[in-house]
Image: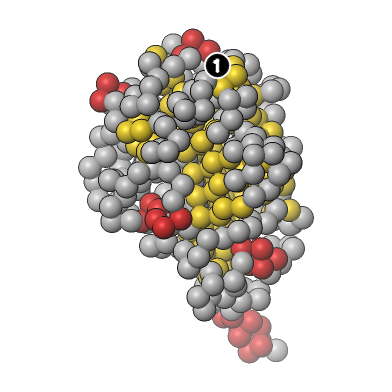
Amino acid sequence: MRTLLTIGLLLVRSGLACQALFTGSPCTATVGTSSRNYSTITACAGAIPVTLDANYVCSLYNDSTFTAFPNITGFTMGSYSITVTAAAGQSFQDQGSVRTNALKVDQTKGVAVIENVGYGSLFSVTPGAAIIISRIQFENTSTTSGGVVTYSGTAGSPNVIIHDCILMSNGAPPFNSAYNTNLYNSVVINMLATKSGVLCYWNCIVEGNTIMTPTTVGVSSGSGVSCLYSPNCTVTSNIIVGFSGSSTVNTAGDYNASDYASQLPGSHNTSLTYSASVPFANATTSSLDLRTTLATLTGKGAMVSGYGMDISGYTRASPPTPGAWELGATSTPRHRQVISGGGQ
């Protein structure tokens, strides 16, 4: 009996306790259309046990465009997490030319989920503990009330982390009606002149992001960031342009840059005159490139705890540039996957 128990412990420690086609530590499965463990993200997420006994990772490969992203719901998490991320070398972030590539949705540069979902979003996340989504490009091409992520989180402390992603929608706020969700180092692109960029119910952390409406769409009457109810949302070190709606309701934070800076919390915000070439390389729909180029923004942001690199994977200066793109980045990048909380 003692021998059997010892073998059982060795199996657990060696990672053989992972379920289905997941292996290693954390339990990881590859996803893609070229001889991977699973051909779809939905199949990978569906193979994760309902009651987690380890951290699980769906590791995505850019074999082709992903056309669906599942709702991640119904899990008993315990102290474990579920991560959906681009595999090493498979994200737009991993391109050798990442610092010169246009910053926009472009599946040729890395893992992308592009889908047409009207009157809804690409996915929702309602777990009871940590869900991490990172290093992925998302676009909802529907012009009929279609967003990217909605109704994420549950009551309690923040439990959903989205970082180093590009979220673009053509029919609804890209980040819509979420709660208890952290958004870091990401680009949010709103393509409607009546919608918000980040619309939160309560208790969201929005730090180090670029949130914008293209100049060719016009100034949106929505808010760049809005928190509908208390407790407050924290809004720090973002670039927020192309919106005219109030961003001060139930929000705290500082060190943002915006063409509507008076509507943001804090006393260290930077006012911008937004145009097709300020503060980005190009803010028009046809030639979109959201790399920050306005030199006067250097050092005007605030460090985001646990996120010392920008969306290109390069180390940020201290103090950093607000927004997802770091003007002062010079270090050699390294691949990152958050597995069980904020960090690199």
Q: Is residue 115 visible?
A: yes
What is the x, y in percent for residue 142? 64, 44
Residue occupying the point 60% across, 46% down: 140
Residue situated in front as seen by the camera: 48 or 116: 116
Residue 314 position (above or below residue 32): above
Residue 297 found in image quarter: top left
Residue occupying the point 61% across, 76% down: 21
What is the x, y in percent for residue 275? 38, 22
Residue 323 found in image quarter: top left
Residue occupying the point 55% across, 68% down: 31
Image-based side of 85 in relation to 315, left or right = right
**Residue assigned mark 1:** 244
What element does badge 1 sit on? strand
Image-based side of 243 in relation to 250, left or right = left
Residue situated in front as seen by the camera: 152 or 136: 136
Residue 48 found in image quarter: bottom right
Q: Quadrant of the N terminus?
A: bottom right
Image-based side of 106 in relation to 317, left or right = right
Q: Residue furthest right?
A: 74
Residue 62 position (above or below residue 143): below
Q: Amino acid at mark 1?
A: Ser
Residue 193 position (above or below residue 85): above
Residue occupying the point 32% across, 47% down: 101
Q: Local crowd at mark 1 within 10 Å, few (<14), some, or many (≥20)?
A: some
Residue situated in front as seen by the camera: 332 or 12: 332
User: Which of the colour schemes (rainbow, by chain, secondary structure, one colour) is used?
Assistant: secondary structure
What is the x, y in percent for residue 118? 71, 44
Residue 15 position (above or below residue 46): below
